Image (spheres, rainbow, N blue to C red):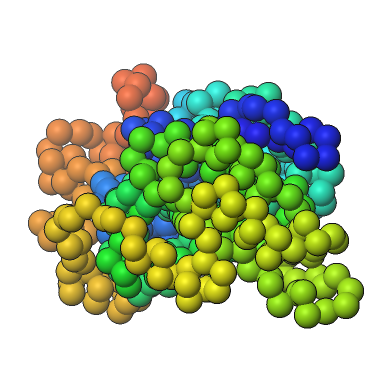
Amino acid sequence: MWSRCGTNRYYYLDMIDFEKIRNSTPSILMLGSYPPIIQSILDFDYLTKKKHSSISGIIGTSGKSQRYFWGNEDILIPVYRNLEVTPWGFNESINLFLSVVSARRVLFTTEITVNSLPNLIGGTIFAENTPEIHSLKIQHIASSQKVFIIGPSSVGLLLPGKLKLGAIGGVEARQLFNPVLHEAGNIGVISTSGGMTNELLNIASSLGKKVSFCFSFGGDRFPITSPVDAILSAEDDPRTSHIIYFGELGGEDEYAIADLIAKRRINKPVIAHIAGSVSDAFKTPTQFGHAKAMAKSKDESAKAKMKVLDKAGVLVGESFTEFVGLIGNIPTKRSETFLLSTRDNRLLTKRKKTIFASSITHETDFGVEVLNKDLLEVARGHSFTYIATSMLLGKEIKSKEIEEFVNLVFKLIMVHQYREPSIP
């Protein structure tokens, strides 16, 4: 990671190791609940043929579990009040987090999470309007703990066919049938704007291109993963050959990027566009949609930044149309077209919730399962006490002593309830 030190100077920290994420099994902790985003991640996991959800749990206050779809079946995702009450081994299993809490809660929840999860690789923060001093503190936390954090105000991180960490790629089932989300390629996509992140994915798909990764670092004044961090992470990613960069007016990050290119720290081809040229038509600085999107000087204008990038050797699209044309010229390795079945499309778009949902029993094409085992098999091999206690606990009991104790309790209850008929 590169972090600002002084006016136009950066010092080197850690970057996002995409290959490390690809080589791991995603285990995501949700900080807060945002049902459309959570369901979209589950649908992505289902469509990419994962055996189970990459979301392992939710930190929240709404009961002990939340109900979602896995394909067209109901599943329950556990909810915990905090990381102190999670089951044994849970915290050690988590390697990614996705924060959807309010802006004012971002700092303390992120700090607790980073300090409580020993195998954490990184995470993303969705909230907009996070206080700037909080973002700077989180940047320090991320650096000291050697984890990446993307955001605030980020739609998330996508590794096609592997990981969807956020709203990136869409939150509706129909949006997730875009082939660019499922088959990895050679183009790294980086954007200030969350909306443009998804638009660039759609453009790449329409042009027959495939991406190696995609994420939005957010439009705040102090993104925790800066544009410089993002470019360097793409440069060091072995599966990325070309970089698409969408920036905005405001700030001086592009000058640092141009300097890195001049020093040959960045050697991969970069295709860029800086939005906001229309601001030159106004007499006074104009604030655009993002906190950082305002040119306080001529050096921060979109045209000035495009000029310095062009001089450094970046392929700059002065108009968005020209930018799209440059993307179309990126060479892409040929591969088989990834097609999702009509059955999956119908299954995800026509499903309905059942009246009841249970994590203990469910029906399959072959019969009824209890605790992920066939009911008849469980009935033949175990006592009534074992089955009843396991179902009450929601997991198989392992202790023979517990089974015998509960059996004794059942007997005492039945004896206590039995009464001899009174004789008149």
Question: Quadrant location of residue 340?
Answer: bottom left
Rendered location of residue 336, percent (x, y): 14, 58
Q: Is residue 209 above or below residue 370?
A: below
121 vs 179, nearest the viewer? 179
| Numbered-mark total | 0
- Furthest toward the front, the residue is 311
- Where's the C terminus, which quadrant? bottom left
Q: Where does residue 92 sit, x and y in percent of width and height?
A: 49, 26
Which is nearer the eye, 300 or 214? 300
Q: Is residue 115 above or below residue 418?
A: above
**From where the camera sits, is residue 141 visible?**
no
Using the rendered image of the protein, determine whether residue 338 is visible from the camera's viewpoint.
yes
Q: Residue furthest right?
A: 284
**Quarter that holds the N terminus:** top right
**Pick the front one: 201 or 171:** 201
Residue occupying image coordinates x 72% and y 70%:
289
Q: Which picture quadrant has residue 4?
A: top right
The residue at 52%/73% (across/down) is 320
> Where residue 178 appears, x then y in whole percent?
32, 68
Residue at figure coordinates x 82%, y 73% from the top left: 286
Residue at x 20% of width, y 43% of height? 373
Side (left or right) of 305 relative to 314: right
Query: Residue 386, image x and y in percent?
Result: 29, 34
Q: Is residue 414 left or right of residue 94?
A: left
Q: Is residue 180 left or right of residue 237?
A: left
